[in-house]
Image (cartoon, coloured by chain):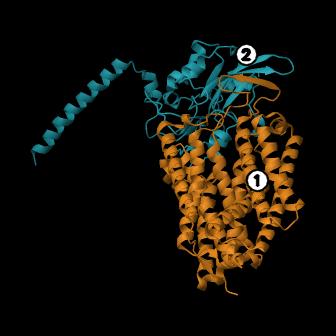
Chain colours: A cyan, B orange
């Protein structure tokens, strides 16, 4: 009996040293960003209702022919081009809009609009389509039965169905054959304080047309920008209160 | 007079040929479902634009037929039309069989058919689809109880109550099926309150036509043909229902032409939709409406009435299938209205009519569902007395 605590202490001490060494090695090895670590949620911390993630897209800065956001999304989530455009998954796509009267061309990215009242969530029979408290609309890959009703209900054609077996999946973005998927606003990045991959790419390689942030925070860049200049929701007539807003369309 | 019933005495070799053909088709459908499940849906004609295809047209046709084929039982139990009383039981069996066939197609086409248990245990009650799961399974339960009450002499007194429940249930069921489309704000073609009455009447007319054809087939197998007066009565009923459906279809399309947001897609279906326009006019308008109405109301001679009725019913079934094909496929294929006044282009088929061509696994799956319904009917009528004895006597006399 008396020797047991001593042994336990010895083991704990060794384990602690090992964990510290492992953590130090992984931090050094992966170049982990300490700021992100500080901002990251713990696994027990849920998305907050005090946050509403949103995206403002200024189409004047969105270049014709630029698809940096699309490429970045495809790489981030490993959305492979299988040479079958009808069935290949696409979470974000570029649209060219030609005015029927004036022939003026606008170019803009279209993705899940992360609606406050998402039709995809309303129609999903199992509740697999859901909206996080912070406004991000997601699909629970474990309860989606692959009925595709949400794809019919989405006014933005923003959802894709996984039509084939998948390989080389990203650990942070698990996908599954036979279920529906769409833009996640890169929750794996947002939850650790980073921007979605498309936004990063737009600033790095594109025209800097995208502003991502918390629309509930009056001091955030997106809130200030939305307040100062006009913007619009696509299919605003449906009153879905989208999380993605457009300017100069 | 007591009504007597008999089982299907399979004396004809045609019974076994038909049963074998249905089993082969059902197995082929099951194989197709397994193939799609293993490879993924890219082997079908369905894609990210047209997400519901031929299997859904089959499934909806079967579900609507199921609801409508209970007409005969309802008319006996609720409206006192004793003329049909011998066929009430069979009407209930047909309804259950068709619904099971339709549900099987729907389930096997799911991206994850192995997750059926999730569909049965996780419900989002805001979803009309979730409500439909209850409506479909509930209908099978209600129709089974109704059948039991009709079969069991001690329970006969409650058959009227069960019949009333089944009657109400199938109205709600077809309203729910129509609502799957009518509630969709994202698709201009679907978003219409007219979908509900249209689907209800379509189910009544299609179900009656299917009932006529299946009872005729059973007659060929067993010699248990309907009495001529039932044939005449059913013919009139079918004619009235088709006329009513035609009226509602006109209202659906004409109201679409009055609505700016739906004008383009309605015009597309009616005038410049290629295969969809052809199927609308040749299928829904001519085969589904004009031909059966002509056969029923314009040709009044008594000779060859049963041939005319069967021809009208076949024509109606083909026409309704075309109607549902146009409804389901063209409604998805036509570009969604996101930017009024703009032409939209993209690498994801925005602004263009999406391409869809049915594939063999879809056809096999759909036919498999029809076959399963047929197998159930052949098997159950073989062991339980579903067929009226009077009918046989009427023919032999």
Label 2: which secondary element: helix
Q: Name the chain under label 2.
A: A
| Residue drawn at (78%, 67%) of the image | B234
Q: Nearer the viewer, residue A158 or B206?
A: B206
Quarter of the picture containing the C terminus of chain A is top right
Location of residue A9 with respect to A170 vertically, above or below: below
In the rendered structure, find residue B140 and report the number of the disc placed on it.
none
Location of residue B220 with respect to B108 vertically, above or below: below
The image shows residue B12 at horizontal and vertical percentages of 57, 66
Q: Residue A231 occupies which quadrant of the picture?
A: top right
Q: Name the chain under label 1.
A: B
* Residues packed near mark 1 inside 10 Å, few (<14), some (14 to 19) or many (20 plus): many
The answer to whether residue A125 is seen in the rendering is: no
The image shows residue A186 at horizontal and vertical percentages of 53, 29
Location of residue B193 with respect to A99 vertically, above or below: below
What residue is pinned by disc 1? B315
What residue is pinned by disc 2? A60
| Labels 2 and 1 touching (C-beta < 8 A) | no
Q: Is residue B167 left or right of residue A202?
A: right
Q: Is residue B243 left or right of residue A209?
A: right
Location of residue B341 with respect to A203 vertically, above or below: below
Q: Nearer the viewer, residue B325 or B290?
A: B290
Q: CA distance from mark 2 to mark 1?
A: 56 Å
Indicate which label's residue lies in the foreground, 2 or 1: 1
| Residue drawn at (64%, 49%) of the image | B58
């Amino acid at each position: 009996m008396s020797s047991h605590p001593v042994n336990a202490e010895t083991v704990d001490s060794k384990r602690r040293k090992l964990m510290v060494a492992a953590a130090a090695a992984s931090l050094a090895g992966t170049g982990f960003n300490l700021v992100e670590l500080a901002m990251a949620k713990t696994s027990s911390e849920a998305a907050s209702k005090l946050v509403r993630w949103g995206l403002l897209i200024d189409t004047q800065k969105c270049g014709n022919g630029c698809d940096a956001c699309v490429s970045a999304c495809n790489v981030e989530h490993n959305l492979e081009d299988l040479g079958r455009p009808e069935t290949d998954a696409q979470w974000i796509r570029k649209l060219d809009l030609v005015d029927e009267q004036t022939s003026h061309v606008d170019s803009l990215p279209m993705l899940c609009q992360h609606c406050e009242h998402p039709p995809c969530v309303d129609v999903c029979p199992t509740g697999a389509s859901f909206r996080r408290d912070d406004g991000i609309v997601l699909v629970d890959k474990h309860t989606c039965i692959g009925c595709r009703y949400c794809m019919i209900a989405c006014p933005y054609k923003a959802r894709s169905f996984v039509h084939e077996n998948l390989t080389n999946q990203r650990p942070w973005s698990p996908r599954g054959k036979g279920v529906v998927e769409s833009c996640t606003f890169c929750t794996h990045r947002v939850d650790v304080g980073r921007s979605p991959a498309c936004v990063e790419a737009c600033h790095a390689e594109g025209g800097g047309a995208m502003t991502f942030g918390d629309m509930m925070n009056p001091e955030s860049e997106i809130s200030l920008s939305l307040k100062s200049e006009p913007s619009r929701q696509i299919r605003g007539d449906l009153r879905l209160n989208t999380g993605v807003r457009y300017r100069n369309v | 007079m007591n009504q007597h019933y008999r089982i299907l005495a399979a004396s004809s070799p045609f019974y076994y040929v038909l049963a074998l053909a249905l089993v082969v088709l059902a197995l082929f459908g099951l194989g197709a479902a397994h193939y799609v499940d293993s490879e993924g849906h890219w082997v079908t004609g369905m894609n990210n634009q047209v997400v519901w295809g031929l299997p859904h047209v089959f499934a909806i046709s079967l579900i609507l037929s199921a609801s409508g084929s209970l007409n005969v039982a309802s008319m006996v139990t609720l409206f006192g039309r004793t003329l049909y009383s011998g066929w009430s039981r069979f009407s209930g069996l047909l309804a259950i069989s068709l619904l099971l066939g339709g549900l099987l197609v729907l389930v096997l086409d799911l991206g994850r058919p192995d997750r059926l248990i999730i569909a049965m245990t996780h419900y989002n009650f805001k979803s009309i689809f979730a409500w439909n799961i209850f409506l479909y399974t509930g209908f099978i339960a209600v129709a089974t109880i109704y059948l039991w009450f009709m079969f069991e002499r001690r329970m006969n007194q409650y058959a009227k109550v069960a019949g009333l429940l089944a009657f109400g249930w199938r109205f709600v069921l077809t309203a729910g099926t129509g609502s799957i489309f009518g509630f969709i704000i994202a698709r201009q073609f679907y978003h219409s309150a007219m979908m509900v009455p249209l689907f209800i009447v379509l189910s009544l007319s299609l179900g009656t036509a299917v009932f006529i054809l299946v009872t005729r087939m059973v007659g060929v197998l067993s010699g248990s043909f309907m009495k001529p007066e039932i044939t005449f009565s059913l013919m009139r009923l079918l004619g009235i229902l088709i006329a009513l459906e035609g009226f509602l279809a006109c209202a659906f399309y004409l109201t679409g032409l009055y609505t700016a947001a739906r004008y383009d897609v309605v015009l597309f279906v009616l005038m410049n939709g290629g295969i969809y326009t052809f199927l609308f006019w040749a299928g829904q308008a001519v085969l589904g409406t004009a031909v059966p109405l002509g056969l029923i109301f314009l040709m009044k001679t008594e000779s060859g009435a049963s041939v005319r009725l069967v021809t009208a019913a076949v024509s109606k079934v083909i026409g309704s299938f075309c109607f549902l094909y146009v409804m389901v496929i063209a409604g998805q294929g036509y570009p969604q209205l996101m930017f009024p006044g703009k032409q939209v282009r993209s690498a994801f088929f925005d602004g263009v009519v999406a391409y869809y061509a049915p594939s063999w696994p879809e056809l096999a799956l759909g036919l498999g569902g029809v076959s399963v319904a047929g197998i159930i009917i052949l098997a159950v009528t073989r062991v339980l007395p579903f067929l009226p004895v009077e009918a046989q006597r009427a023919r032999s006399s």
